[in-house]
Amino acid sequence: MSNATPTATPSVMASAHPLRPGDLRAMVQDLSNTTLNWISDYWLQIAISAAAAAAIMSLLFALRRWGRRNYDPLVGPASMRAVFAQVVMRTTTFFIVILAIRVVSKYSQMPDNLEHWMFVFFAIASVIQGAIWTRELILGLIEHRTSAKNFQGETILNAMGLIRILVSFTVFAIAAVVLLGNIGVNVTGMVAGLGVGGIAIGLAAQGIFADLFAALAIIFDRPFNRGDAISYGDSSGTIEAIGLKSTRIRAYTGELRVIANRNLLDKEVLNVSGRNHIRLPFMIGVAYETPPDTLERLPGILKELVEAEGGIAARAGFEKFGESSLDFALQVDVPGNDWPLAHDLRNRLLVAIMRRFAAEGISIPYPTQTTYTAAPDGRLIMPYAEPGQASTSA
């Protein structure tokens, strides 16, 4: 049997005793010796890797300079090129340097202790830089989407401020979880806690979040813009402001109506300002005594009057036999969405119809009913005098 006593390994000794100044000097000396030996043994691989790393650094620095030249903070990402420039200009010097060192360590047989620390630094730099790029890409696409002039103002600035906070919190929270997971930290409890906390906050503020997301839907989907005339439900008016919780609509009767964004989107919204023409419907009744030849010419007369006033006759024709008149339907289209112009054309057209009907001898009857009575002998008594009786009376 051997009487040799076991010896403690350096890691056990280090954990059993506190770190002393002499131990620290020994660790630094050991790291220095390892580094010098590595450089002397793999100097050619290090040189080649360093050249490749220098080329990568030069490319990334040049790309960052290009991004700064092509991004105007006053204009914002008005094009996809500007969005890409906004992303690349956020490349950090720390990431560029760590990436270059990582290239050298990957292809030059770096010692294990140095390789471990290099992996830790590279993981930190990569996750942080990835989060920064993702954040800038999302915000750039959103700003590009909202770059139209109708969306510039206090509303979109407030919305973008809130979106920046939400996007930044979400992206960097995910980045923190990924980073901790890569360095060996158990993140299961953290992910569960974040999930439970998010559900609790969502339930507590579901009304606020519903209005907020409805506001974002209005801003990005653009069913209407500020200044548009809309009809919703039984109401109508002009959009004055689109807020994060409510939309303010100026009614045609003068009052200012405030409606929650989610309630507004739950209704059918008719964007009157978005129409490309205005249709004016008319129902014109003529007397039953009108001659058939005149009735046959009547659609052409109506079309002629519409074109003379600058409108488009979408339909003009006999519609039905009314209770006291023969009804003709006339539908007039006025190009554009100018209501005052359309109403002025409507007024001129009605006057022109009355003048033409008077010239043609076409009568527009009042709603009338004729009552017939009978004498005791069964003979009908006419509601008007017979020709013979009229002459005798005269």
Image: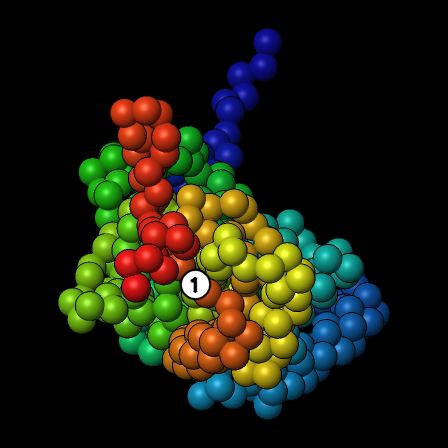
Q: Is mark 1 on a helix, strand or loop?
A: loop
Residue extending farthest front = 392
Q: In what quadrant of the picture does the N terminus appear?
A: top right
Residue at point 53%, 16% (across, down): 3
Q: In what quadrant of the picture does the C terminus appear?
A: bottom left
Residue at point 56%, 50% (across, down): 319
Residue at point 64%, 86% (across, down): 66
Q: Is residue 255 visible?
A: yes
The color scheme shown is rainbow
The image quarter containing residue 44 is bottom right
> What type is the residue that disc 1 sits on?
Ile
Residue 58 image offset from top left, x and y in percent: 70, 82
Dot 1: few (<14), some (14–19), or many (≥20) neighbours within 10 Å? some
33 relative to 325 in the view: left or right: right
Residue extending farthest left = 255
Q: Is residue 214 above or below residue 298?
A: above
Residue 369 image offset from top left, x and y in percent: 33, 45
Q: Is residue 357 above or below residue 232?
A: below
Tell me the residue that label 1 is attached to. Answer: 364
- Given residues 184 and 376, the one toward you in this image is 376
Residue at point 32%, 68% (across, down): 239
Residue 19 image offset from top left, x and y in percent: 35, 49
